[in-house]
Structures are given as structure tokens and as C-alpha cells.
Amino acid sequence: MTDTEVLQIFRETQALLSGHFLLRSGLHSRQYFQCALVLQYPRHAEKLCAALAAKLPKADTVISPAMGGLFVGHEIGRALGLKHIFAEKNAAGALELRRNFTVGKGEKFLVVEDVVTRGGRVQETIDIIKTRGGEVVAVGTVVDRSGGKANFGVPLVSLLKLQIETFEPAVCPLCKEGKPVVKPGS
């Protein structure tokens, strides 16, 4: 699947937003990938995730951080015939394994997410796997908007890799122009 085809699906589903956005990473941006608007269509979720799955190495299990990675993880698991589990926020806002999900010693994992900017939730998920004796073999994401800056110590595989300008809030030109910031979800 080409970058053009992936972007076309985002445009077709109105999931590539323009404006002034607050990202989960705390950064501000002019563009926002609202993957939920793409993934609400099972045919798109299946197509995008099957294309991503084809690029990923072999593993035993797929794990994703909730919420954004849930559908991606499920579809990657389906495409590869693997179990999918997820990490979710606790009362303090940190990710943890719940629902009796387990990590076996030496179990090989693919960590998958919808969009990576800085990769904070991905790193939290990797840490959960490692502290339980599992091994992360790769990270997969539909959109890598880190500009090559995200580094997890394992291969980062994406369908779409973009350099999208982001700003620290203190120096955001959109804030200086007085444009209201929006947090669409994440």
C-alpha cells in the first residue's frame, strides 16, 4: 500500500484534520490524524492493518495501548492469526495490564499503535512487556509522524511516515496568533 493510498483513505473518511491541535504528547500541531474516523469502517481497518501486518516480523502476541491502538491491534492480530491484548490506563493515568492478561517469559510481542508522535504510550507498553519477561520484536503503527525521531530500540514499522511540524506550547505560532487549541481525542 502506497503513501498516496493511505492518505487517500484518511482524506476520504475526513480523518486528516487541519487546524490547531493539542496532541496526547503535549505538543501542538496544524494537522491531526483522527484514526478513529478511519477505523470506524471495518473495510478500511482491515485493509490498512493487513498491509501493516505484512511488513511486521514474526511474533507470538500483539499488544496495543488503549484507546488508539485497540482496533489496530485487533486487526493486526486477525491478519497474523495471533492473540491480541491491550494495556489500559489505571486511576493515575499510567498504562497497566488488566483483565487477567499475562506475559509469558520469552514471549515475543508486536506493539502496535494508530499514530506515533513521540511514542510515550508505546514506550509504556514496551516497559510493561519487558518487566514481565517478554520480548518486543517490533513496533508497528499506521502513521509515524515522528519524523524519524521515535526510537524504541526495536524496528519501527509504519504504513505512512511523515515529517509533520509540531510545537512546544510555549513557542506555538498558532497560540501566538490566538487560535483556539482543540483536543480531538486520544
Image (cartoon, rainbow, N blue to C red):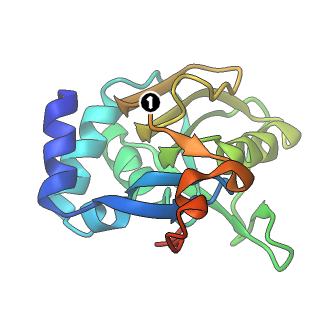
Residue at image point 86% right, 74% down: 92
In the image, taking residue 108 as reference, residue 49 lies left or right, namely: left
Counting the numbered discs, the total is 1
**Where does residue 79 sit, x and y in percent of width and height?**
30, 42
In the image, taking residue 49 as reference, residue 31 lies left or right, namely: right
Residue at image point 45% right, 26% down: 157
**Where does residue 97 sit, x and y in percent of width and height?**
74, 62
**Where does residue 123 sit, x and y in percent of width and height?**
73, 41
Which is nearer the eye, 11 or 123? 11
In the image, taking residue 74 as reference, residue 185 lies left or right, namely: right
Which is nearer the eye, 105 or 63? 63
Q: Which residue is mark 1?
A: 163
Residue at image point 47% right, 47% down: 115
Q: Residue 143's quadrant in the figure?
A: top left
Q: Amino acid at mark 1?
A: Gln
What quarter of the picture does the C terminus occupy? Answer: bottom right
Crowding at dot 1, Cα within 10 Å, few <14 / some 14-19 / many 20+, comes out as: few
Q: Secondary structure at mark 1?
A: loop
